[in-house]
Image (cartoon, rainbow, N blue to C red):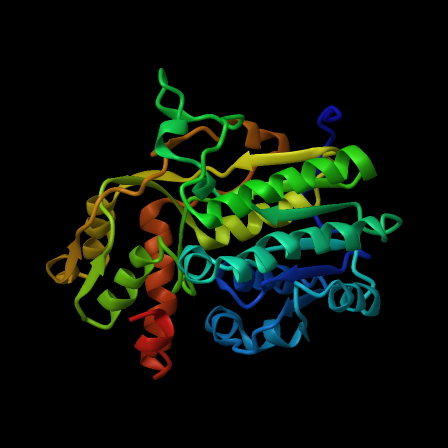
Amino acid sequence: MIEPVGTTSTSGVADERFLVTGALGCIGAWTLRDLAREGTPVVAFDMATDRRRVRQICTDEELARITFASGDITDIGSIEAALDEHGVTNIIHLAALQVPFCRADPALGARVNVLGTVNIFEAARRRSDRIRQVVYTGSIGMFDAADADPTTRRLENDATAHPLNHYGVYKQANEGTARVYWLENGVSSVGLRPMTVYGTGRDQGLTSSPTKAIVAAVLERPATISFSGRTVLQYADDVAQTLIVASRSALRGAHAFNLGGNLVDVRDFVTEIDALLPGAASRIIVEGAPLPFPEEISDAALAALGPVPVTSIRDGISATVQILTRLRDAGGLVPEQHGL
């Protein structure tokens, strides 16, 4: 029930106005920065008030271009007010509670992750005259390692998901919500499924410890990466840029794409940190079992969006170290704000 792939625009449109939900999280902050940097009007929609992640990566000029709107994703009236007040044309929906928070309070996790997504689609449906589609983040976390193809050992884009936790169940439900809004209401959508995102601002969640290790290395502190083995790592800015590309695409239908990146052993990740900050490896411990998700991920279907960035591990770590070093030297690298 998905229409043929259309063409994709790689540049902004003069009358674009973006709304980013969950904008004060890691990926949200990078999305805000990228849109503000190119001069595109963007509204940051979040119930939180702590803007530290945005400040960590934005210049004062970029910050001044962002409109901050307080709102509750579980309240559709709050969403609709923001969409109408700012004449929003593009929605990038990132608001979600991560694995530990969903585990601690499943009911709250369902309200934020599932009801919040339904609210976004419903609000977009009511404004189909100006909002062409919804772009949202799914997650590889909705898959079990056994969901990989038994022959290729890769997770294919159309694999059947068997979630291992509430967070995964909610992410699977959101893809179903997207599909039904297309079938019944003609609301197009693109969902992107990240795996292990790293970069400045990634201080929460099951797979945040590689970023915390970089922070600790810059501060010359010990750190522990809480899982071993291989995983696909994605630089936060790559995820943000791909979300923006998706929002400017001409795709019709309900699409969900595995997000590509770099398949890396965690110990090799530590070696790359040490290459930039000699001595760091002696202070970083890797322990715990491998993540319970597929290691190898097929991102071939993502070609429907056209070219998207994939930053090398060395370059991603280097960029992160540069930002963190600047913060440290300015007295702004507070360990507690980075999950240490």
Q: Residue furthest top?
A: 151
Closer to the camera, 126 or 262? 126
Closer to the camera, 53 or 171? 171
Q: Residue at x 46, y 37 (%)?
A: 260
Q: Residue at x 35, y 53 (%)?
A: 207
Q: Residue furthest right?
A: 129
Residue 13 in the figure: left or right of residue 236: right
Residue 271 in the figure: left or right of residue 299: left
Label tally = 0
Q: Residue furthest left?
A: 282
The quarter of the picture where the N terminus appears is: top right
Q: Position of residue 105 (x, y in %)?
A: 47, 62
Q: Position of residue 94 (x, y in %)?
A: 58, 56
Location of residue 148 by image quarter? top left
Location of residue 185 by image quarter? top right
Residue 114 in the figure: left or right of residue 271: right
